[in-house]
Image (cartoon, helix red, strand yellow):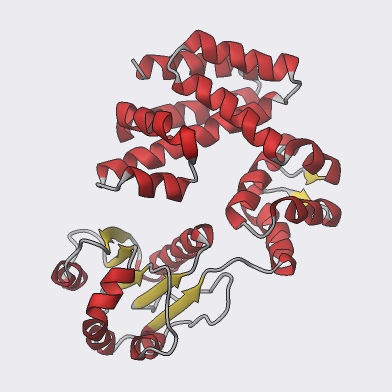
């Protein structure tokens, strides 16, 4: 019999033990869901070693396929995490069967359900609480988001943030953890490793204008012409006065998302779902997905690694940041042909 896991009744991060056999991640905050899934995997790896993660679409996957995957042994890994995405119809259709599975879950795998809604009055909820966790991933209160921002800056971005700067960031962006984390990453790049984010940096770099500037260089790159991308690069740095390290972040953020999109495409995910998860909205989605298809996951991974290496070289004194960014523009355009 599987051991009892940690059960969550409130929004916010949950500490996993590695003993969970069924986990529910529900609520509207997709960023918090992804963070909880990452935390779950880390706990499983610490407990069991290498972990294999597989995904099923809740709208189309038969129950038998999911259960067969849970009950089959992996060839290399000792433990598996089987994730059912968009799990509302899956849970609605198979709730009684899932109750029976929760009574005797296998020890070599963990089932993760990601529905939009969940009912704590269900028998299934009580059954899962005995062997796993039900995590409510909803927007935090401003006070909780403020505490999260301070901790996130230190733990994930190796930067300090003053109380005034953190308050200003939450005031600008609300409790959207995805946007808060994205802006924290930009601010951390701007102050450098171990630096302190001040309120004036938040005023200068955060908000609609920085998002639009990010799209300007990203759009130029996605157009596939190196000369256009290089011209936009110099326009942002030399005319608009943006720090070159911040523009590097804009490029790296696009490349990271392109790689994720290419991987999800190879796994059969729909364009709409990919763009929603990666927060690529409106008119930006078409050129973005076109580039992800053209590059493919292997070439996207190579370009991301190349950009990371160029950034490392710039920070180590091997080449100027602008020159290295120009090199990346040329390589990216060549890959888009």
Q: Residue 187 in the image: x percent, y percent?
A: 71, 41
Res 189 seen here: no
In the picture as drawn, the residue positioned furthest to the front comes out as 282
The quadrant of the picture occupied by the N terminus is bottom left
Q: Nearer the viewer, residue 293 or 247?
A: 293
Q: Residue 330 in the image: x percent, y percent?
A: 46, 13
Q: At 62% across and 23% down in the image, what residue appears? A: 314
Q: At 26% across and 67% down in the image, what residue appears? A: 78
The quadrant of the picture occupied by the C terminus is top left
The count of marks equals 0
Q: Residue 98 in the image: x percent, y percent?
A: 25, 81
Q: Nearer the viewer, residue 241 or 315?
A: 241
Q: Is residue 116 above or below residue 189?
A: below
Res 317 seen here: yes
Q: In this view, does 33 lie above or below 179?
A: below
Q: Left or right: 142 with respect to 128?
A: right
Q: At 31% across and 59% down in the image, what residue appears? A: 53
Q: Is residue 256 above or below residue 244?
A: below
Quarter of the rendering containing residue 238 = top right
Q: Left or right: 328 with respect to 297?
A: right
Q: Left or right: 187 with respect to 176?
A: right
Q: In this view, does 165 lie above or below 74?
A: above
Q: Residue 227 in the image: x percent, y percent?
A: 51, 8
């Amino acid at each position: 019999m599987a051991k009892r896991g940690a059960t969550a009744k409130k929004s916010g991060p949950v500490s996993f033990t590695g003993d969970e056999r069924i986990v529910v991640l529900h609520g509207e905050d997709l960023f918090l869901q992804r963070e909880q899934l990452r935390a779950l995997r880390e706990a499983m790896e610490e407990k069991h070693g290498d972990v294999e993660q597989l995904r099923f679409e809740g709208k189309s996957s038969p129950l038998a396929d999911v259960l067969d995957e849970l009950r089959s042994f992996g060839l290399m890994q000792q433990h598996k995490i089987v994730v059912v995405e968009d799990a509302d119809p899956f849970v609605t259709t198979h709730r009684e069967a899932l109750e029976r599975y929760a009574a005797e879950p296998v020890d070599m795998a963990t089932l993760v359900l990601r529905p939009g809604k969940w009912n704590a009055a269900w028998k299934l909820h009580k059954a899962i609480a005995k062997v796993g966790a039900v995590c409510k991933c909803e927007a935090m209160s401003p006070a909780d988001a403020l505490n999260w921002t301070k901790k996130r800056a230190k733990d994930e971005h190796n930067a300090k943030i003053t109380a005034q700067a953190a308050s200003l960031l939450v005031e600008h962006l609300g409790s959207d953890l995805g946007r808060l984390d994205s802006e924290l990453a930009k601010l951390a790049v701007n102050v450098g490793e171990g630096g302190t984010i001040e309120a004036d940096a938040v005023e200068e770099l955060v908000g609609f204008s920085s998002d639009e500037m990010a799209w300007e260089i990203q759009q130029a790159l996605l157009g596939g012409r190196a000369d256009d991308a290089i011209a936009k690069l110099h326009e942002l740095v030399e005319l608009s006065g943006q720090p070159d390290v911040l523009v590097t972040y804009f490029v790296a953020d696009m490349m990271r998302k392109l790689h994720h999109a290419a991987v999800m495409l190879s796994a059969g995910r729909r364009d709409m779902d990919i763009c929603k998860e990666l927060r690529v909205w409106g008119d930006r989605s078409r050129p973005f997905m076109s580039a992800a298809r053209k590059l493919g996951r292997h070439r996207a991974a190579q370009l991301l690694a190349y950009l990371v290496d160029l950034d490392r070289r710039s920070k180590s004194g091997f080449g100027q940041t602008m020159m290295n960014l120009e090199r990346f523009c040329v390589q990216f355009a060549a890959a888009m042909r």
